[in-house]
Image (cartoon, rainbow, N blue to C red):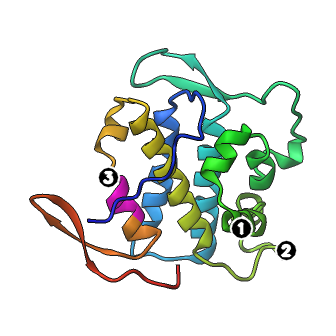
Amino acid sequence: MNLYAPDTSVVGPVDFRAPMVEVAWNYCQLVIGSSFQRGMIEQTLAALAIEITLKSYNAVAVGNIGKLNETYQFQLPQGFKLPPKDRHNLVALAGLLRADLRHYLIEPLDEDVLEANKDAFSDSRYSYEPDAPKSFSNSAMKLAIKLICKTVYLYKQRGCTDPFVSTFDVNAVFFTHVQRYGFAHSQVGWATCCPPDSSV
């Protein structure tokens, strides 16, 4: 059985922001669970999911503290500034992560995906405008799902008991939507039934 187990030992203390991660995952599910495929919409929702996941690491609880409906507000780390034009810029948001979190979350190849999609939320949502992108790929969606998987895995390792985190099957999601393994559910868990797609 294949297990997705990124190394969390490099990560320092982390605050759980499970409701934010769940919202990011909901945006991903709108795409992967639908037969209605439109590239620019996928690009926009993927960028939004990445943005929310990145922001969750710099969010503070502001309401309903300790409850399942806890609410949050994004807060710039001390000493950092973010110009209004960069509030959706994925590269700028990644730059706000603590060094240990960035090392854990973003692999070298992911940097290229962030750069290619840094303004996707701002640029792709109005596909009818003359300056809108004319092409797209699924790389942003794969990155969004990978960041969510890494975040949920980290939360699980650190003892988060939020219902979304507890029921989220990191292995099934990662190997179905990021690295293309096929899964067959058995009494002992998820097992691969076909070889990995070497193109991902």
Residue sitting at x 48%, y 84%: 198
Q: Secondary structure at mark 1?
A: helix
Relative to residue 170, is residue 98 depicted above or below? above
Quarter of the image with the N terminus is bottom left
The percent position of residue 68, horizontal first and vertical second, equals 39, 24
Residue sitting at x 58%, y 63%: 143
Q: Name the residue nearer the viewer: 144 or 87.
A: 144
Mark 2 or mark 3: name the one nearer the start of the chain: 2
Asked if the residues shown at circle 1 and circle 2 are in contact, with their CB atoms under 8 angstroms apart, the answer is no
How crowded is the residue under tag 3: few (<14 C-alpha within 10 Å), some, or many (20+)? some
Relative to 105, 119 lies left or right: right
Quarter of the rendering containing residue 113: bottom right
The percent position of residue 57, horizontal first and vertical second, equals 63, 35
Asked if the residues shown at circle 3 and circle 1 are in contact, with their CB atoms under 8 angstroms apart, the answer is no
Q: CA distance from mark 1 to mark 2?
A: 9 Å
Relative to residue 124, is residue 133 depicted above or below? below
Look at mark 2 in the image and give the residue it sits on: 131
Relative to residue 168, is residue 188 depicted above or below? below
Residue sitting at x 44%, y 16%: 66
Q: Nearer the viewer, mark 3 or mark 1?
A: 3
The answer, for residue 33, to whether it is visible in the render is: no
Q: CA distance from mark 3 to mark 1?
A: 30 Å
Which residue type does callout 1 highlight? Ser
Which residue type does callout 2 highlight? Asp
What is the chief secondary structure element of the magenta stretch? helix
